[in-house]
């Protein structure tokens, strides 16, 4: 049989939601995946009694991961949310200051600003990449703007050329939220090394994980000392120089040596996994570009390497004879045996971003109104919420999953009339 015949036979097979035979699930490998050295390093930590923070494995991980992302300095912190919060505080952002944040992201990006009494200002996204729209960022700048947070989302990187230029022209620092972008590169330089600070999450489902954890990168020696003090109750880092240090009020946002042990072990295999994800993103996007009914995201040439946490593509409703995006996602999940979702709900309407549910944010009537996310309009983010399709990154760690995904979409398209009924 020719490969064209193969494709035809495959496409004729009944989709699972129409009663077809379920296929073996793609990406059946578990996540997280032990890399090898975890138990050995954990045993070493347990024996050493060095269970808390500032241990040797933490120092080693900080050195290795900062270098991997092309940053001068890196510091472990409790989680990705705290990383963003401390990054803002290191920049002395506080009460009533405005922080521009993409309207399409996980709520933590905005909540980090909210929790330091700043005002998150929600910018819309670029339809082609789902990352923050530089033109909208510039439109939202006021004399009160103290920081811009960009998020590298779903296999895209925010336009660091344009955002960097806007930040520099207005004298506003840029923070990169890299929770989805460990190992990703813009113009062949690591995510987290472009902005004034970069923030990472090591939460369980992220591509580099210790169950929980976070990381802050910077090239600025003063900000390094600030982040150290902020994560450690205001204490001074041993070895810090007077010129880079000031006393600062803070709490405990530290990580443990047990987490550092797991992170170091995971880092052993991370680059191979990141390369595999990058290769499979290229393969999958090439495949999607050939299919009716769907489209890959725009890929600017500056995105030189991508190792996403979730992979996004677009559903084109006009090409499915009435099948809804939600029904398509359900049918695709059934074909593949993996979770298929839409993008995050835009923050002006997200169930988990509700500043008005906590009296803590009622600093004044004016502040209460300023933090109301419903005052922002985010048409492009809303559109993305309707059309976006997300696959988990473990699909990209299974080379055989790539043809399975494109075949499943072709099969669904061939049966679109029956599916839409
Ligand atoms: C874009 C983004 N930023 C920040 C975070 C916060 O990270 P954490 O869960 O480690 O606090 C997440 C977590 O999912 C995220 O997706």
Image (tube, grey):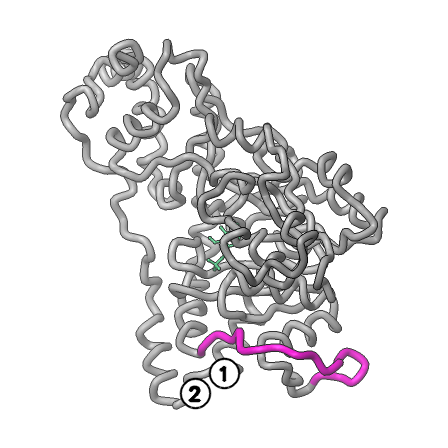
Label 2 to label 1, Cα distance in Å?
A: 6 Å
Q: Position of residue 9 (x, y in %)?
A: 22, 14
Q: Nearer the viewer, residue 326 or 390?
A: 326
Q: Position of residue 87 (x, y in %)?
A: 65, 63
Q: Which residue is mark 1?
A: 55
Residue 397 in sight in this render: yes
Circle 2 Cα neighbour tier, 10 Å, few/some/many (<14 / 14–19 / ≥20): some
Dot 2 or dot 1, earlier in sequence: 2
Q: Which mark is residue 50?
A: 2
Disc 1 is placed on an element classified as loop
Q: Is residue 245 left or right of residue 344?
A: right
Q: Residue at x 49, y 46 (%)?
A: 307
* Residue 336: quadrant of the picture: top left
Circle 1 Cα neighbour tier, 10 Å, few/some/many (<14 / 14–19 / ≥20): some
Ligand 1 within 8 Å of the CB at mark 2: no
Q: Position of residue 201 (x, y in %)?
A: 50, 59
* Residue 327: quadrant of the picture: top left
Disc 2 is placed on an element classified as loop
């Amino acid at each position: 049989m020719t490969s064209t015949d193969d494709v035809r036979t495959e496409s004729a097979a009944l989709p699972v939601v129409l009663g077809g035979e379920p296929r073996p699930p793609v990406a059946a490998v578990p996540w997280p995946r032990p890399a090898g050295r975890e138990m050995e390093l954990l045993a070493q930590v347990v024996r050493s009694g060095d269970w808390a923070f500032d241990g040797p494995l933490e120092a080693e991980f900080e050195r290795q991961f900062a270098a991997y992302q092309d940053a001068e300095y890196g510091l472990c912190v409790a989680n990705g949310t705290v990383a963003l919060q401390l990054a803002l505080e290191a920049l002395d952002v506080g009460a009533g200051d405005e922080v521009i944040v993409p309207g399409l992201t996980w709520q933590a990006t905005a909540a980090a600003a909210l929790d330091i009494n700043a005002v998150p200002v929600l910018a819309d996204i670029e339809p082609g990449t789902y990352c923050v729209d530089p033109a909208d960022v510039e439109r939202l700048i006021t004399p009160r703007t103290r920081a811009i947070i960009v998020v590298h989302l779903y296999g895209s990187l925010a336009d660091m050329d344009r955002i960097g230029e806007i930040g520099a022209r207005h004298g506003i620092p840029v923070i990169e939220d890299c929770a989805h972008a460990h190992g990703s590169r813009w113009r062949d330089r690591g995510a987290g090394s472009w902005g004034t600070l970069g923030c990472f999450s090591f939460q369980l489902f992220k591509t580099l994980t210790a169950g929980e954890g976070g990381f802050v990168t910077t090239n600025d020696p003063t900000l390094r000392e600030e982040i150290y003090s902020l994560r450690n109750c205001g204490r001074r880092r041993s070895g810090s120089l007077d010129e880079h240090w000031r006393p600062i009020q803070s709490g405990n946002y530290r990580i443990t040596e047990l987490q550092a042990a797991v992170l170091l072990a995971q880092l052993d295999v991370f680059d191979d996994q990141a390369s595999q994800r990058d290769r499979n993103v290229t393969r999958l996007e090439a495949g999607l570009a050939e299919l009716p009914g769907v489209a890959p995201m725009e890929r600017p040439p500056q995105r030189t390497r991508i190792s996403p946490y979730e992979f996004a593509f677009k559903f084109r409703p006009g090409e499915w004879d009435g099948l809804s995006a939600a029904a398509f996602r359900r049918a695709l999940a059934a074909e593949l045996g993996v979770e298929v979702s839409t993008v995050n709900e835009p923050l002006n309407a997200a169930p988990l971003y509700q500043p008005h549910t906590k009296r803590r944010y009622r600093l004044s009537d004016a502040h209460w109104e300023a933090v109301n996310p419903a005052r922002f309009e985010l048409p492009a983010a809303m559109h993305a919420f309707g059309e976006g399709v997300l696959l988990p990154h473990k699909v990209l760690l299974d080379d055989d999953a790539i043809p399975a995904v494109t075949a499943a979409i072709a099969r669904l398209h061939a049966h679109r009339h029956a599916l839409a009924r």
